[in-house]
Image (spheres, rainbow, N blue to C red):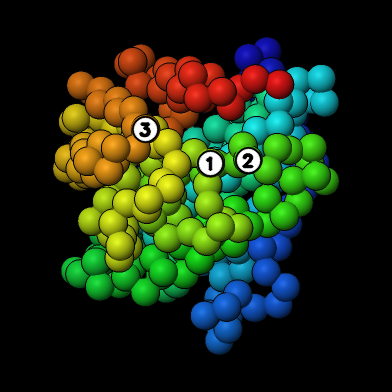
Amino acid sequence: MRSTLSLLLTLLSLTAMSQEKVIPLYTGAAPGSEPWTQQEKESRTNTWHTRVVFNVAKPTLTVFQPEPAQANGTAVVICPGGAFFALSIDSEGFEVARWLTAKGVTCFVLKYRLVECKTDDPTTELTTISDLDMVVAPIIKLAMADGNAAMGYVRQHAKEYNLNPNRIGILGFSAGGTVTAAVAFNYSPETRPDFVAPIYLQYEWTPKPKGVPSDAPPIFVLAATDDPLGLASHSFALYRDWLAAKKPAELHLYAKGGHGFGMRKQNLPTDHWIERFADWLEVQGFMKK
């Protein structure tokens, strides 16, 4: 009985996913990676024990829309993480979108460009890289461009999705947090996010050529102190930079949670991080209709 119910829930989830609208971010090849020929793939059997997407060469947005009666006019671009080798598409992407959509927020899950993998297991291949900083450096610039293009698309199509063009933000995890922070430092008037939320980001990879912008948006920063990658200090550094620039900022550093928890349940306070994010959106006025 239990296995039958589990199968039914899985089928319902897959059906719901198939109904989401997927939008190519660019017309034709993505600028800056025109010669790329790798084909996007998925892995369900890997060391991260979750479904991941890899070899993204053609960035897309997957749209999750709330029921019209619940929609509040706010939108967020969601950037899953995976060290720029993969995207943890469920716990840091689609599951986040479904939770926020239930609260009235329209969500756009971004598949941004990644390092080309030579194997079918990006999580293992990642561990063989001796100089990760050098490998991901050129990809970060492309992923940042994808983040800005996503912001521009959502704002340009705000009317189509019944959105307030002044209530569009970006949220990301780990490498996706780097993309989020990169957009927060490198936007145009058309792509400026109205709020940003990097979650356990890698801050040292973030391009910040001119420091915190003079019109920087409010920021929500969150991580776990026991992050095994040592990234808790990165979140604190970003928070400190926003404070020094006298811009609105909120920081959450949990005692336990590790790295890459996303929407996974660990029976820890980090299980409720997204509720704290929603609280912050409420305080900022982004959850009101």
Residue under pointer 2: 166
Q: Residue at x 25, y 23 (%)?
A: 254
User: Is residue 63 placed above or below 12 in the rendered structure?
Assistant: below
Marks 1 and 3, the one that precedes in the sequence: 1
Q: Are the residues at dot 2 and dot 1 in contact (C-beta closer than 8 Å)?
A: yes
User: Is residue 94 placed above or below 191 in the rendered structure?
Assistant: above
**Is disc 3 surrounded by few (<14), some (14 to 19) or many (20+) residues within 10 Å?**
some
Alpha carbon of mark 2 to alpha carbon of mark 3: how far?
17 Å
In x, y percent, where is residue 120?
A: 46, 64
What amino acid type is highlighted by mark number 3?
A: Pro
Marks 2 and 3, the one that precedes in the sequence: 2
Give the secondary structure at mark 1. loop
User: Is residue 127 placed above or below 134 in the rendered structure?
Assistant: above
Rendered image quadrant of residue 235: top left
What amino acid type is highlighted by mark number 1?
A: Asp
Q: Are the residues at dot 1 and dot 3 in contact (C-beta closer than 8 Å)?
A: no
Task: From the viewer's side, name the closer residue of 20 and 128.
Answer: 20
Residue under pointer 3: 248
Give the secondary structure at mark 2. loop
**Is disc 2 surrounded by few (<14), some (14 to 19) or many (20+) residues within 10 Å?**
some
Q: Residue at x 32, y 70 (%)?
A: 137
| Quadrant into which the N terminus falls | top right
Marks 2 and 1, the one that precedes in the sequence: 2
In x, y percent, where is residue 229?
A: 20, 45
Task: From the viewer's side, name the closer residue of 89 and 76.
Answer: 76
Let me know if residue 119 appears in the view: no
In x, y percent, where is residue 245?
A: 27, 43
Residue under pointer 1: 194
What amino acid type is highlighted by mark number 2?
A: Asn
Let me know if residue 206 appears in the view: yes
